[in-house]
Image (cartoon, rainbow, N blue to C red):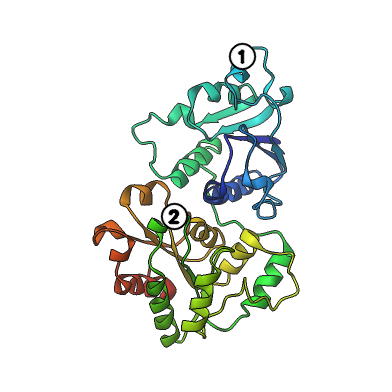
């Protein structure tokens, strides 16, 4: 019987952490009574910061200190990774062979390693599929990724207050870390107008540094909601990724660039239209949405602006209608 599980990684920035959420949910479902420890060998992980409230109830412990493989000397025989602790199951999610040896030293029972399988001919390209393969190997084919359900009751109450039942809500997330990844804001505004004309309610998601875009959207599409900026609930302690993921569960569909907000909408269970810049990255870093449509700009021309509004609108309607 598996009572202790160790997940071994190098660490997670926001995109990595969001992509891994369905894997984490599937892991907890496969081992509901086990103590699940997560080691970020290079110390930094968003599960200790912005996503701490999101993974509550799924990850029992973070291991961030010690000689856990983040440095070359950690592989020496005298080193004691994980403080010398042993686990019934260790899943090594990284693909460096040397570091995999460090992870193996924590296994008292089964050891499953991405480093071992990364050279297999059928090793998946997509990060989400690689994690699914590891989970399947660790559970003799019984485990699989699944949507993550938030355990924070205030987050769920905040989402219900901000997006009450009744309207058909469509999320629009125009932001991205790099300008080259952004579909033009005017295209999002045109999509929002079509959403309104359809009788649905557009819901914009703007980051803290996107006040100018938020103001333009409020002016150009006054029917649209911006629940993160115009709080009407009493749960102001719920914010950031936790709030976005909670709100995503209220959406009939969402549209986002290849960026963190898109992964947040996917993690919350929203059917997602992902707007990608190039096909290679769209495959490897595909959002972990249960229902997903993807449009790739390079299929239409050069740059994100080449992606036509009509194509996005057709794909969005398929998502919202359930035809996707």
Q: Nearer the viewer, residue 265 or 269?
A: 265
* Number of on-image labels: 2
Q: Residue furthest top?
A: 77
In the image, which disc is placed on residue 278? none
Left or right of 261, for residue 107: right
CB within 8 Å, label 1 to label 2: no
Q: x, y percentage for residue 21?
A: 57, 50
Secondary element under disc 2, as helix, strand or loop, is: loop
> Looking at the rendering, which quadrant does residue 296 occupy?
bottom left
Tell whether 266 sits left or right of 57: left
Which quadrant holds the N terminus?
Answer: top right
How far across and how far down the image is residue 70, in percent? 60, 27
Q: Is residue 82 above or below residue 172?
A: above
Q: Can I make out residue 53 in this image?
A: yes
Q: Residue furthest front?
A: 212
SS at mark 1? loop
Label 2: how many Cα within 10 Å (few below 14, some 14–19, many 20+): few
**Residue identifier under label 2:** 178
Alpha carbon separation for disc pair 1 and 2: 40 Å
Q: Residue 104 at what x, y percent from top left?
A: 59, 23
Q: Residue at x 56, y 79 (%)?
A: 225
Residue at 24% over, 62% down: 300
Residue holding disc 1? 76
Please state which of residues 274 and 121 is positioned toward the viewer in this rendering: 274
Quadrant the C terminus occupies: bottom left
Q: Is residue 175 above or below residue 60?
A: below
Mark toward the viewer: 1 or 2: 2
Q: Which residue corresponds to the image point at 72% horizontal and 40% vertical from the top-left?
A: 61
Residue 222 relative to residue 322: left or right: right
Quadrant in the rendering for residue 147? bottom right
| Residue 2 seen in this snapshot | no
């Amino acid at each position: 019987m598996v009572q202790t599980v160790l997940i071994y990684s190098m660490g997670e920035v926001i995109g990595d952490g969001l992509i891994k959420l369905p894997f984490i949910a599937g892991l907890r479902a496969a081992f509901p009574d086990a103590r699940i420890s997560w080691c970020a060998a290079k110390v930094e992980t968003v599960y200790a910061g912005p996503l701490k409230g999101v993974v509550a109830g799924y990850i029992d412990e973070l291991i961030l200190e010690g000689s856990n493989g983040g440095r070359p000397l950690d592989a020496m025989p005298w080193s004691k990774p994980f403080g010398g602790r042993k686990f019934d199951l260790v899943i090594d999610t990284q693909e460096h062979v040397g570091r995999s040896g460090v992870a193996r030293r924590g296994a008292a029972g089964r050891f499953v390693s991405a480093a071992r399988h990364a050279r297999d001919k059928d090793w998946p390209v997509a990060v989400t599929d690689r994690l699914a393969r590891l989970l399947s190997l660790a559970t003799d084919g019984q485990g699989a990724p699944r949507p993550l359900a938030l355990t924070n009751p205030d987050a769920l109450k905040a989402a219900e207050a901000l997006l009450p039942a009744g309207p058909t809500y469509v999320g629009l997330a125009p932001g991205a870390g790099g300008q080259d990844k952004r579909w033009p804001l005017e295209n999002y505004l045109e999509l929002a107008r079509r959403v309104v004309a359809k009788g649905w309610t557009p819901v914009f998601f703007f980051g803290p540094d996107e006040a100018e875009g938020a103001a333009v959207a409020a002016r150009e599409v006054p029917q649209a909601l911006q629940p993160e900026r115009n709080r009407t609930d009493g749960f102001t302690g719920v914010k950031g990724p936790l709030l976005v993921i909670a709100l995503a569960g209220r959406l009939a569909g969402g549209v986002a660039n290849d960026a963190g907000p898109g992964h947040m909408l996917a993690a919350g269970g929203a059917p997602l239209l992902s707007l990608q810049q190039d096909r290679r990255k769209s495959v490897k870093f595909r959002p972990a949405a249960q229902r997903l449509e993807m449009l790739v700009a390079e299929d239409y021309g050069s740059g994100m602006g080449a992606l036509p509004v009509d194509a996005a609108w057709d794909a969005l309607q398929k998502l919202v209608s359930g035809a996707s």
